[in-house]
Image (cartoon, helix red, strand yellow):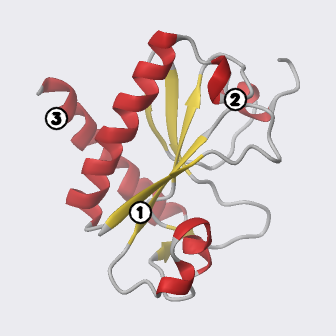
Amino acid sequence: MPDCFICKKHRSEISTKAGWIYGDEHLQVFHRPLLGQEKKVYLGYLMIEPNRHIQGLDELEDIEAQAVGVMQARLSRILKRELKAEHVYSFVIGNHVPHLHIHIVPRYPGAPREYWGVRIDEWPDAPRGGQAEIMTICEKLRESLILENKS
């Protein structure tokens, strides 16, 4: 789709200041970008985005679904190990961007129960950071994915 935000990002037509983590013939993985005037974001908040422009899980071909599922499991293991997450959420919301993107979000120790689930990034005391911290996490996650892929 020529006007799709995610498709444009994958074609490098727009810069999102998001940290790229991984890409292959089926999908791309990015850290959640700084949006608008944001100075900091919830660290470790990742997005899995199929390369093909589709709107929902029901449109994934079996090979794409397998790639997405494997990536969700790998990222969850890595977020627990490297960022010390106590739980990892996976959400598909799809209300604002008509290109499937799966949110992979760590829950850190100490997160109050009222912020669990889709509100986790609203937790005021959550680990947050700017572009430098995002890039540091992305490098760590890239290295871990390389090791996971070799296993």
Q: Tag 3 or tag 1, which sits nearer the N-term? A: 1
How far across and how far down the image is residue 3, in percent? 88, 26
Alpha carbon distance from label 1 to label 2: 22 Å
Instruction: Give the residue type at disc 1.
Output: Pro
**Residue occupying image coordinates x 55% and y 80%:** 115
* SS type, badge 2: loop
Of residue 24 and residue 19, the one placed in the foreground of this image is 24
Front residue of this view, candidates 132 and 108: 108
User: What residue does disc 3 label?
Assistant: 147
* Quadrant that contains the C terminus: top left
Q: Nearer the viewer, mark 3 or mark 2?
A: 2
Q: Name the quadrant containing residue 137.
A: bottom left
Residue where numbered disc 2 is placed: 56
Which of the pair 27/39 is nearer the observer? 27
Q: Which residue is mark 1?
A: 106
Q: Please, what is the three-letter code of the amino acid marked with disc 2? A: Gly
- Marks 1, 3: nearer the viewer: 1
Q: State the CA–CA distance, disc 1 to disc 3.
A: 20 Å
Q: Amino acid at mark 3?
A: Leu
How crowded pointer 3 is (Cα within 10 Å; few <14, some 14-19, many 20+) is rated as few
Residue 19 seen from this side: yes
Distance of label 3 from label 2 (alpha carbons) = 30 Å
Q: In the rendering, at what x and y percent does residue 21 appear?
A: 43, 39
Q: Secondary structure at mark 3?
A: helix
Mark 1 surroundings within 10 Å by alpha-carbon count, few (fewer than 14), some (14 through 19), many (20 or more) = many
